[in-house]
Amino acid sequence: MGMPITVEILDAGANTNVFSDIWSHFSSVDRKYSTYKKDSEISKINNGLQTTKWSPEMKTILRLCEQTKQETGGYFNIIHNNKRDPSGLVKGWAINNAAKLLLARGFQNFYIEAGGDIQVHGLNAEKKLWRVGIRNPFKRTEVVKIVAVTTSGVATSGTYIRGQHIYNPHKPDGLVKEVASLTVVGPNIYEADRFATAAFAMGKAGIEFIESLASCEAYMIDDKKQAVFTSGFEKYVVKA
């Protein structure tokens, strides 16, 4: 998927077959949705593949993208330069499905991370809540906050790893310059990831959008190195 993927399973019974199945899942997602692969289904669609030839799964993903667009006032928009790129939703969706695969096999204590987006379940090796660090976008070796979660998804949108890749579809130039990073804690990584992408595209107003969601909390660092967070975010923060 063009990004590092980490899977940690703490329960007995985790073997190479399980990890191979997880890898196969992510590889399948990459083959279908990568805009960098000329033979992926999304690339074929962008090159004119007829709607009647789209797979049922692709139709579901594009329907979910349209739903998210409507839920975010158009800030989540997968069309840029007349091409579809659903990666802002697919990554979280894929991680969430990997977690469902593990749960279906009876695993209860695990951690899945892909490109900085994380889904956890149960407890870590110390029998405590999983701890996830939020990096300083201006100094990546520094962790500014640590959140403790057990069944949540944690997604961060920012420019410090991939550069500027999220655009405001309502502005002519589209570039979001006033936000450096925005981390969302949600009920699962699918919800956290799609809303983190949309909220980042909103600029500083994104934190207010997350505040309006009953299921999510967020922590934002702006271009002036100032942090602001939603009213319920601190319940996740590990105190020093």
Image (cartoon, helix red, strand yellow):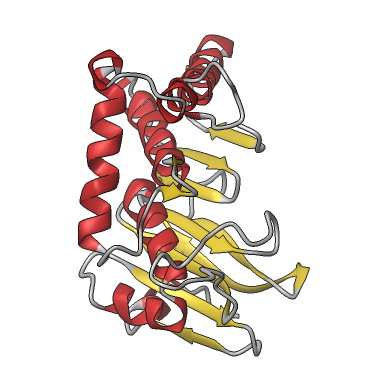
Up-down: is 70 above or below 240? above
Image quarter where the N terminus lies is top right
- In percent of width and height, residue 224 lies at 65, 90
Name the residue at 51% across, 41% down.
Answer: 111
Up-down: is 112 above or below 157? above
Name the residue at 30% across, 34% down.
Answer: 61
- In this view, the residue farthest toward the top is 17
Q: Is residue 129 visible?
A: no
Name the residue at 65% across, 87% down.
Answer: 225
- In the image, taking residue 207 as reference, residue 221 lies left or right, namely right
Q: Nearer the viewer, residue 150 or 96?
A: 96
Q: Nearer the viewer, residue 191 or 185?
A: 191
Q: Nearer the viewer, residue 220 or 147?
A: 220
Q: Is residue 81 visible?
A: yes
- In percent of width and height, residue 184 lies at 42, 65
- In percent of width and height, residue 139 lies at 78, 73
Up-down: is 39 above or below 214? above
- In the image, taking residue 64 as reference, residue 193 lies left or right, namely right
- Residue 145: name its quadrant: bottom right
Image quarter where the C terminus lies is bottom right
- In percent of width and height, residue 7 lies at 57, 33
